[in-house]
Image: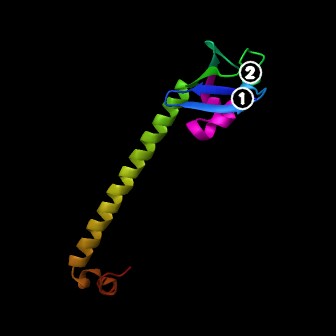
Amino acid sequence: MIGRRIASERDYHRFQIGGSASGDVKSLLVHDTGLEPQEQHLLFKGQEKQDYELLHDAGVQDKSKLLLVEDAAARERRLQEQQKQEQFARACQIISHDHADVDKLEEQTPPSMFNYRSLSEHFSW
């Protein structure tokens, strides 16, 4: 087993893996980082490792340090999605507030204004 230390923007991740491919390491980091494997770039000695590359073939040894970098385009997509969700939440809150205002107005309105039967007597449909 080889001990590896992965540095990301937020944390260091330590784990033991023997003879793994870069893609396997990315899959292990999904839970810890919240990044899907296609959103991750794994670097060793300044060079990005492809998902199919075996880390020991690339020279990764016990206690080697790998760098995990988030894909910039994925970050931008995630931020845009977060902004859309926040806008939707604000819109829902406004609608909810307006609905409450309508309910208050309905309570203040005399019931005779909503007597649809009397309206139908006055108008021939």
Residue 100 position in % (x across, y down):
30, 67
Q: Residue at x 38, y 79 (%)?
A: 125
Q: Residue at x 49, y 31 (%)?
A: 10
Q: Residue at x 51, y 36 (%)?
A: 78
Q: State yes or no: discs 1 and 2 in contact (Cβ < 8 Å).
A: no
Give the extent of the magenta segment.
25-42
**Vertically, is 115 above or below 59?**
below
Main SS of residues in magenta: helix
Inspect the image, locate mark 1, and give the three-letter code of the amino acid beneath it: Gly
**Vertically, is 8 above or below 114?**
above
- The residue sitting at the top extreme is 46
Inspect the image, locate mark 2, and give the three-letter code of the amino acid beneath it: Leu
**Vertically, is 91 above or below 99?**
above
Report helix, strand or loop for mark 1: helix
Report helix, strand or loop for mark 2: loop
In the foreground, 109 or 32 = 32
Tally of numbered discs: 2
The residue carrying mark 2 is 55
Left-right relation of 34 to 118: right
Q: Quadrant of residue 31?
A: top right
